[in-house]
Amino acid sequence: MNKTFLIVAVIFSTAVFSQAKNYLDKPYFEIRATADTLVTPDRIFIQINISESDTKGKISIEQLERKMYKTLKNIGIDTDENLRVDDMSSNYKKYLLKKKDILKSKSFSLMVEDAKTLSKVFMGLENIGISKTSIKRIEYSKDKEVQFLMKQKALKIAQKEAKLLTNSIGQKIGKAIFISAQSYPQNYARNDYQIRMKSEVAMAPAPPIDVEFKKMKISSSINIIFELQ
């Protein structure tokens, strides 16, 4: 069975090499193009940690959770759809060692769609004594669609540039004989967002502050080889 697999692999590799050699034997023109755009993130994931230790055990985890749910619903957040429990724990091990009260904690993940709602969440939770909040990550919901559009745009750029360059030496490009595409992941400076948001929320007056996220870049590149006529 291993021998059969090896023979198939060798035949496949030879076929691929043969195809590559066939088009490289012809005159060709290779070009690379990149296209990108900026988008506003519409999925912001917030980490919320509530703990009885924050109130020195005066308020139970159940009370804190009820206050949190009420605050989020008042903001207009669908907690059934956008809030989930990440983790729940207690200091039971420390209790066994030091005979202190058991203090429970709970971690949640909340998704909001814009920076204004994020500001309301941070301020609302701060007002009820929940301050351990941070941004986990941000995303753009139509990332894949935009990547595809950028690939199409990069292809058109590459074709246009190839025509201009070859025409300048009295030649023309033929059909494309090789195309490869690559998209780059969304990038953002997580720490910058956390620091900026926490600082602004801490200094904000009663009304929610109007904040915006820096736009995210979505980029795709194309490497294409044309026959040269």
Image: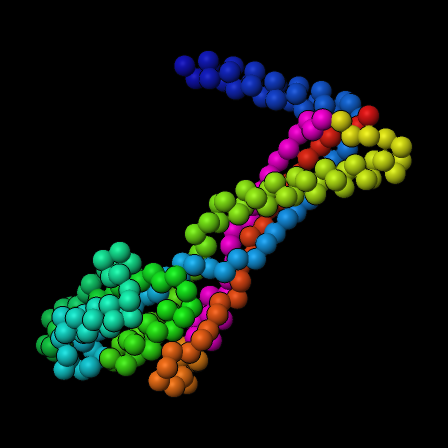
Q: Residue at x 28, y 64 (%)?
A: 77
Residue 160 picture quarter: top right
Front position in the image: 101 or 46:
46
Front position in the image: 7 or 32:
32
User: Which colour scheme appears in the figure?
Assistant: rainbow
Q: Residue at x 72, y 23 (%)?
A: 23
On the image, the x and y values in percent for residue 222 come to 64, 40
From the viewer's perspective, tell me whether residue 215 is left or right of residue 162. left
On the image, the x and y values in percent for residue 2 come to 43, 17
With respect to residue 14, does 126 lie above or below? below
Q: Residue at x 51, y 16 (%)?
A: 8
With respect to residue 11, does 204 lie above or below? below
Q: Per the image, is 194 magenta?
A: yes
Front position in the image: 33 or 113:
113
Magenta-drawn segment: 175-197
Residue 58 picture quarter: bottom left
From the viewer's perspective, tell me whether residue 105 is left or right of residue 17. left
From the viewer's perspective, tell me whether residue 130 is left or right of residue 139. left
On the image, the x and y values in percent for residue 209 come to 42, 78
From the viewer's perspective, tell me whether residue 199 is left or right of residue 72. right
Q: Residue at x 18, y 82 (%)?
A: 56
In which quadrant will I find the N terminus?
A: top left
In which quadrant will I find the C terminus?
A: top right
Can residue 5 be seen here? The reply is yes
On the image, the x and y values in percent for residue 161 come to 76, 41
Q: Per the image, is 9 magenta?
A: no
Tally the numbered discs. Answer: 0
With respect to residue 226, does 15 lie above or below? above
Can residue 28 be seen here? The reply is no
